[in-house]
Image (spheres, grey):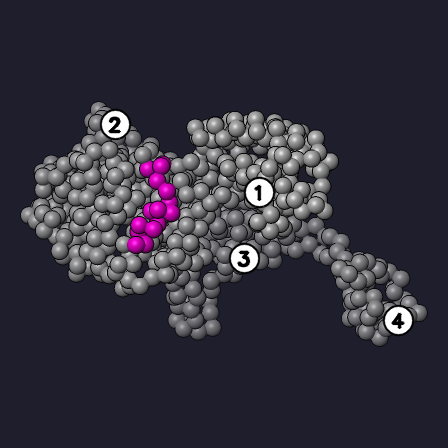
Amino acid sequence: MNQNLLMELQAEELPPKALSSLSSAFAQGIVSSLSQQGLLSSDSQVTPFATPRRLAVHISQVSAKAADKQIQLKLMPVSVGLDVQGNATPALLKKMQALGMDAQQLSQLEQKMDGKAMALFMAQTQAGVTIEHGLQVALDHSISHLPIPKLMTYQLDKGCTMPGWDSVSFVRPVHHLVALWGEQVLAVKALGLTAGRKTLGHRFEAKAAYLDISHADQYEKTLLEEGAVIASFDKRKALIQQQLLQVALAAGEGLKPIQDEALLMEVTGLVEKPNVLLCQFDKSFLEVPAECLVLTMKANQKYFPLLNAKDELTHQFLVVSNISPADPSAVITGNERVVRPRLADAQFFFNQDRQHTLASRVERLAKVVYHNQLGTQHQRMMRVSALVQQLSTVLSTAAEQTDALAAAQLAKTDLLTDMVGEFPELQGIMGAYYALNDGHSQQVAQAIEDHYKPRFAGDSLPRSDVGCLLALADKLETLIGMFGIGNLPTGDKDPFALRRQALGVIRILLRSPFDTMRLDHLLEIGLGILAKEYAIDADKAKSELYQFILDRFAVNLKDQGFSAFEVDAVLALHPQCLGDVPARMQAVRAFAAMPQAEALAAANKRIGNILKKAPKADTSQFSSAQLKLPTEKNLHQAMEQSVKQADAFYAQKNYTDSLKALAALREPVDAFFNDVMVNDPDDNIRRNRLGLLNQLHDSMNRVADLSRLAN
C-alpha cells in the first residue's frame, strides 16, 4: 500500500540567506534515505517547502513497508569454519546456533571467494522496514547532515526528563514536528519533539493560533487558506518578482527594480506572504553617489531601489512587506521613516569625506597595519607604486604612465574615509568619486575603482590599460608578499584570496598589451622590491608562486573545455608568456584531431625516454655525413623540409600550422624506429643517431610537449 508523505519542522525564524540550501538538504536527506531503504517507488515525486519558520517536504508514492530481500550473510572463513575433513568446527556450530540453525543445516551454507580467501555464506531473508521506522532513520539522517551555518543550543520545556534543563542543538528552536503518511500520523521523534499534525501559520494573519493538517496532500492548501502562508519557496519568489515588476510599472513609465538575485533570495526567506509596496525618500539624497544609497537600502533594509529607463537611481524604492493591511499607509510611512536616517548618514559621510583630499590621507596609511610581517598599507602602497613604475613601459603614452603612478599612490586611501569605514564593499568605488572631486582625471579615477577587478570568477577586467596595470601590480604584490613570507593557501583555507588573485593576474596577462609580458620577469621584479624590505628566500618564493599560478591556469583552461591531456601538453613546457597559451591550446587541439597525432605523440614519448637514459653529451652532436641507413637519411631529409616549415610558422606565432607541418614526419619516424637501432655498438653512430633524435625532439616540442597526448 502506498500513500503520500509529509514531513515538517516548524521553527523560529530561520536564517534567510541559508533557507534555500537548508530546504534542499532537508528534502534530499529524507528522500535519499527512504530510497535506500526501499520505501520509494520510481514514480515518487518530491516537493520541498521552505518559509521563514519551516522546512518541509512532500513525497508521493511512499510504501507502508519495504519489500523483503535476500541477502548473503558472511559467517566466517572456510579455514576457520571447516576442518580438513569438511566437518563444522565448534566455532561454526556456535555461530549457526546463534543464528537459530543446527548442524543439520550445514549443507545450506555456500562457499564463495571473499577477497583472497574462501568464506562461508548463508542465504537469509531480510524483512523490509516499515514506513515509521524508515522515516525515523531518514529524519535523523537528514537533520544530522543539514548545512547549518551556526548551531544554536536551547532548552526544552516539555516532553523531556528535566524540562528547562535538557537541551538540544539546531539552527533555531523547533516547536512543532509534523509527520503524515496520508491521514495517519507517524510518531517519529526529533529535537525533543514527537510528531503530530499541528503546525503554525502566519504570525499575524492566520485564521487560528494552530493549524491541524488533516492529510499529507492538504498541507500546502491548508497553510495558504487557513494560515496565510505560501509554503513553496519558489512560488513565493516568483510572486515577489511579479509584484516588484507590477508595482514598479504602476509607479512610472520605464521604472524597474534593481536586479539582485541574492537580495531576492534573502527577501524570499524573510516573508511568508509577500506584499510589495511603493515608498520614496527625499530627492536631495540623490546628491550622494548611487552606489552608497543602493547599498544602504539593500544591505540594511532589504529594499529594492527603483531605476529609471536610463538605469539611473530614482527617489523611489520597493519594500516587500510580510503583512497585507487594508490601508498600507502606516507600513509605507514606517519604512520611509526608517530609511531616512540611513540615507542621512550616507550623505553626512560623503560630505565629510570630500573635505579632505585623497592625497592628504596618504601619510595616514602608515598607521594602518596591512600584515604583521609585511608592514603597513603605506609600505604596501610604496611596493605597488614601485611595481607600476617598473612595468609602466607597457603603456603606450607618458600620460598613461603618469596616471598609473598617481592611481597607485591613491588607490588605498579611501580605506581611511568614513564611507568605506561604514561600507567596506564600496572601497575603490568611493576612491573614484573622491579622486574626481579632487580634480584628478577620469583615467585615474577609473583605475582606482577598477584595481580590485576581477573580484570573482566571471567579473569584468578593468576598463583601461592603466586600470589593468594597477590591478596587475596590486595582485602581484599580494601574491609575492604572501609567498615571500611563506603564507600559502592550504586546503580550503585561503584568507587572502590568493587563488582569486592568481586568476586575476592570469586574465590580465592574456589581454593586450600585457600578453607579451613574461611571468618570470614580473616575479623577479616584485620579489626584488620585497627583498629590499624583508629577508626572504626569493628563489623558493618564485618557484612556488610560479607553480601556484600555473596550477590555477590549468584549472581555468579545463573549465574552458580543454582536456587534461591538452592542458598538460602545453603547460608541461612551463610557458612564461601566458598570452601565448590560448593559441598553443588551440594548436594542440587541432593537432590532436589529426590522424597522425597518436602515432607521433607515441613516437615523441619514445624519443623522450631514449634521450633521458643517454648522457647529455652524447645527444649534442649530429652530422648528416655520418648517417648510414636509408631510413635515417629519409628522416633527416623529411625533417629538413618539415621542421623548416614548422619553424617559420612558429616564428609567426602560427602554432596550429607549425604543428600541422610536423604531421608529415609520421611515416619517416615510424620507418626509422622499425629499421634503425639507435644504440648501435659503434659509439660514433650511436651518438649521431641520438643527436638526430634530439633535434627532432626539440622541433616537435616547441609548441607543446606532444608526448603528453600519448595514451
Locate residue 331 relative to residue 89 in the image: left or right: left
Q: Which residue is mark 4?
A: 83
Residue found 73% across the figure and 36% down from its top: 675
Q: Which mark is residue 621?
A: 1
What kind of residue is marked 2? Leu
**Residue 517 placement (x, y as % from top left):** 35, 40
Q: Earlier in the sequence, mark 2 or mark 1?
A: 2
Q: Of residues 450 and 50, which is closer to you in this image?
A: 450
Q: Of residues 277 and 451, which is closer to you in this image?
A: 451
Which residue reaches farthest front?
Answer: 625
Which residue reaches farthest right?
Answer: 85
What kind of residue is marked 1? Gln
Count of number-bearing discs: 4
Give the vertical position of 284 relative to 156 (above or below): above
Disc 3 and disc 4 in contact, CB within 8 angstroms: no
Residue found 28% across the figure and 37% down from its top: 394
Which residue reaches farthest left?
Answer: 355
- Residue 67 appearing in the image: yes
Residue 521: within the magenta?
A: yes
Dot 3 falls on a residue whose secondary structure is helix
- Badge 4 crowding class, 10 Å Cα cut-off, few under 14, some 14 to 19, many 20 or more, is few
Instruction: Give the label, 2 or 1, closer to the camera.
Output: 1
- Badge 2 crowding class, 10 Å Cα cut-off, few under 14, some 14 to 19, many 20 or more, is some
What kind of residue is marked 3? His
> Which quarter of the figure is the C terminus placed in?
top right
**Residue 461 placement (x, y as % from top left):** 31, 37
Query: What is the spatial separation of the Cα atoms under label 2 and label 1, in whole angstroms?
Result: 81 Å
Query: What is the spatial separation of the Cα atoms under label 3 and label 2, in whole angstroms?
Result: 47 Å
Q: Which residue is mark 2?
A: 249
